[in-house]
Amino acid sequence: MTLDDLQRGQSATITAVDWSMLAPDEAKRLRALGLDEGAEVSLAHAGVFGGRDPLAIVIGRMTVAMRRNHARAMAIRVEQA
């Protein structure tokens, strides 16, 4: 399962990131925001048109807007309630 499969309100842990799927500057920005292996995230919102872009990902106390194709590079483990 990847981060773009996460449902609104679900929590997950990022287990792996395929950095080769991202441009180097995009990968650097996402790492700087804490979106790396081991990060606990949840989906706050997904866009309503077309490809449902952008995604609003909550990490810690911050919400980050992310394109769905970037989220597809991140494997996750969903937290069970």
Image (cartoon, helix red, strand yellow):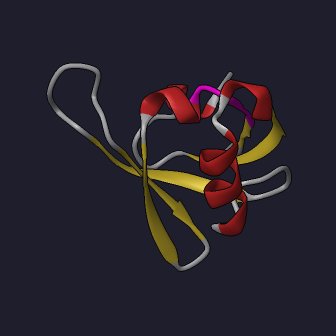
- In percent of width and height, residue 36 lies at 78, 53
Q: Residue at x 46, y 61 (%)?
A: 64
Q: Is residue 81 above or below residue 61?
A: above
Q: Assess whether residue 75 is covered by the magenta stretch.
A: yes
The magenta stretch spans residue 14: no
Q: Quadrant of the N terminus?
A: top right
Q: Residue at x 52, y 45 (%)?
A: 10
Task: Give the quarter of the image for residue 74.
Answer: top right
- Which residues are drawn in magenta? 72-76
Q: Say if 2 sits above or below 30 in the image.
A: above
Task: From the viewer's perspective, tell me whether residue 50 is left or right of residue 58.
Answer: left
Foreground residue among 33 and 47: 33
From the top left corner, tell me how far across and down residue 29 is, in percent: 62, 59
As rendered, which of 57 and 34 lies closer to the eye?
A: 34
Instruction: Give coordinates of residue 21: x percent, y percent.
Output: 69, 25
Residue 81 shows up from this direction = no
Q: What kind of secondary structure does the magenta stretch mostly adopt?
A: strand
Report the residue at 76% width, 58% height from top.
39
**Residue drawn at the location 45% of the way across and 31% of the way down:** 68
